[in-house]
Amino acid sequence: MLEIEHAQLYFPVRAGVLVDRTVAHVHAVDDVSLQLQEGHTLGIVGESGCGKSTLARCIVRLLEPTSGSVRFRGTDITHLGRKQLEPIRREVQLVFQDPTSSLNPRKRVAQIVGGPMRLHGIEKDRVEPRVRDLLERVGLNPEHINRFPHEFSGGQRQRIGVARALALDPRLIVLDEPVSALDVSIQAQVINLLDDLQDDFGLSYVFIAHDLSVVRHVSDYIAVMYLGKVMELSPAKELYEKPIHPYTEALLGAIPIPDPKENRARERMVIGGEPANPLDPPSGCRFRTRCPRATGVCAEIEPPFAEYAGGHLAACHHPLNVSREEIARATRSPFTPLSAGHAMPDVRQVTGDGAPEAAVAGSGIARSETVASEAPSATEPGQRAPTTDGEAQGS
Amino acid sequence: MAERLLDVESLKVTFATEDGLVHAVDDVSFTLDRGEVLALVGESGSGKSVTVMTLMGLTRSPNARFEGSARLRGEELVTAPDEKLEKIRGREIAMIFQDPISSLSPVMRVGDQIVEQIRAHEKVSKAEAMDRAVNLMERVGIPRARDRARSYPHEFSGGMRQRVMIALALSLSPSVLIADEPTTALDVTIQAQILQEIKDLREQSDSGVIFVTHDLGVVADVADRVLVMYAGRVVEQGTLDEIFYDPQHPYTWGLLGSVTRMDRNPPHRLPAIPGLPPSLLNAPVGCHFRPRCPRAFDRCTEVPLLESRVEGTPEHVDRCWLEVSEKRRRREVEGRIGLAAGTVA
């Protein structure tokens, strides 16, 4: 359904006194490769600035990658022009994060959901019945077809967004944080709706979120992004039980569990610092400035994407939760960024309990003293010892 | 016996609007002691933000009507004259707002904002106030505080801005700290840091904290007691364990049930509460939750009294007419919260 290969999107930063010159680039998406099978859901998680929204826009071609490729059902859509993209647009749709700003407040629901159909030449008299049908499908009252967005609640507006995305009978829907702006009990409703629609229409989803618990519920596979790169890619269930990349473990550790006893029992790793500047990311592994397991090699060589058993990939020199045998058998994945080194995790470098030898906390200079006035990420990488290898995260 | 800091009794806040009266806060009572964290949980329209803003006097306006009382260490807040409230605000009771970028002045350096707050309440020199400000910023984990005090809010990241807000709130060592969704706008790893700060604060400064949130994970992490609000009313109140493991109100167990958990295999279908919160202009007669409640019966058209129905826990109160045994039975079936197995008395 979807193949992304070494996609890159750099935003130029222009500055200058008399003439604007490009002084730097924001490495928003920096060599990302992913795949999605038909009928499946790929979840993409990451914090602010990781590039997931930019990637979403590359997939639906709202943005054009500066290099690499995006193939949809075999067709390379990376650099297609507007005209050529028209037929593709029917098949790939986007649901936005903010249900309020993504709907035109001056248009009625009929126009919002019907608009795409009219744009693509569907006859007028077929549009309205279809709009009514779609509204009903997403759990809204078709009688409200002539209302304006402000007459609906947040959750309902999001359903309108979903109805609009379904209007042209797409094959792939990219959802950019579709439930983040909604109340908890409404989130559950919308998630259930998306589930049902996927079954009914045989849809494929790319589901982007920062909330790992929501993503777990909807995804078949999950990609964890950080500062423009994919750190880990795993079948959904396994990501939570056996996170390999320290960043994933940090994310999991940071999420409080809505269960006081479990929460109390859990030893949480609270990692310090903040994501570094995408204008000037750290050398080697981007996460090393906050990683409790970072050593010298992490600053020198960007870790390749190692493929472990079960289709579980991680880009880390000092992976967690993998045995020596698994490390020995790991292969270099073709999804590995072109800039990455060739050094696969070395079994010898990982001691019995999984702690990397001679781990130098915060080694590697945080090369973040740049144009932006942002403070560089703190050099203390972690405040508590990480869980050791072999200890599965969560229940 | 910890000191009682806050005593709110039957607080009512009503706004007169073009379309009618909005009972934003309807008979809300709670207390807060030193060293406690009280979580105020609710979704949009629940009245939780209006409640805490009223404590700070921030909801006073020509169309607002107040009833009931809120006593801060004996001092009445609801009817206090503006001048009195100005003295109390910041000094005795302080608030950390949800969105720091809109709550900090964009045209003042952050150090100066903290200095301004200090000097509004205490007679100290600018230099001394600045020393204190830098100290506070260090305490909340802002690196290179002396330098960064000269930066403007937009020059900080979200997490750092929130720390500035915390430093500002702490500057006069208030007894009551209100945190209104302080981590909603932040990334999860930064949220973890901020929550840790707040927990540390509670240890160090012995103030009481009211933590307003809709995130049950955060509640499970920081709260001692929980107040659940729905459509302006308190629907349940109890200790953390009571609320999570023996929730009495259908809304509470619906809320707990609909929360996604990342440490469990997801259920095939997320239990969701059907429908929407009611409009406060046209609230349902009797129990506000009645239209969405799978167990509503005829008595529900009478406003349920907030009382303790569970034996042995007089502080665990709820607003639901159902018998306790009925509640527990239904909860297992409909709530499917998956937490309470084995903990029912």
Image: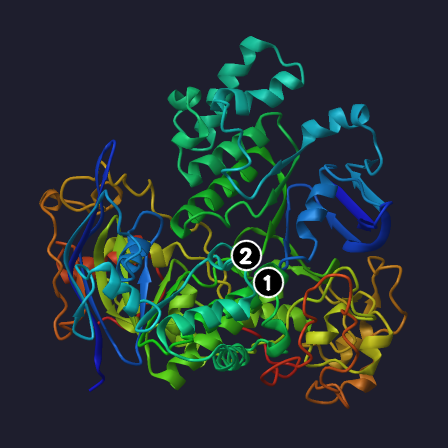
Residue A84, horizontal then vertical, whole percent: 81, 25
Of residues B286 and A392, which is closer to you in this image? B286
Q: Secondary structure at mark 1?
A: loop
Asked whether, in this view, residue B306 is left or right of residue A265, the answer is: left
Which residue is labeled 2 in the image? B106
Q: Mark 1 — on which chain does it sit?
A: B
User: Can the viewer see residue A242 in this picture?
Assistant: no
Q: Mark 2 — on which chain does it sit?
A: B
Residue at 53 percent across and 20 percent down: it is A111
Asked if marks 2 and 1 touch (Cβ < 8 Å), the reply is yes
Earlier-in-chain disc, 2 versus 1: 2
Q: Which residue type does callout 1 highlight?
A: Tyr
Residue A124, horizontal then vertical, whole percent: 57, 10
Of residues B100 and A151, which is closer to you in this image? B100
Asked whether, in this view, residue B50 is left or right of residue B179, the answer is: left
Of residues A130 and B326, which is closer to you in this image? A130
Q: Quadrant of residue B148?
A: bottom right
Q: Is residue A21 above or below residue B265?
A: above
Q: Which residue type does callout 2 highlight?
A: Pro
Numbered label attached to residue B152: 1
Of residues B298 and B202, which is closer to you in this image? B202
Residue at 27 percent across and 56 percent down: it is B229
Q: Secondary structure at mark 2?
A: loop
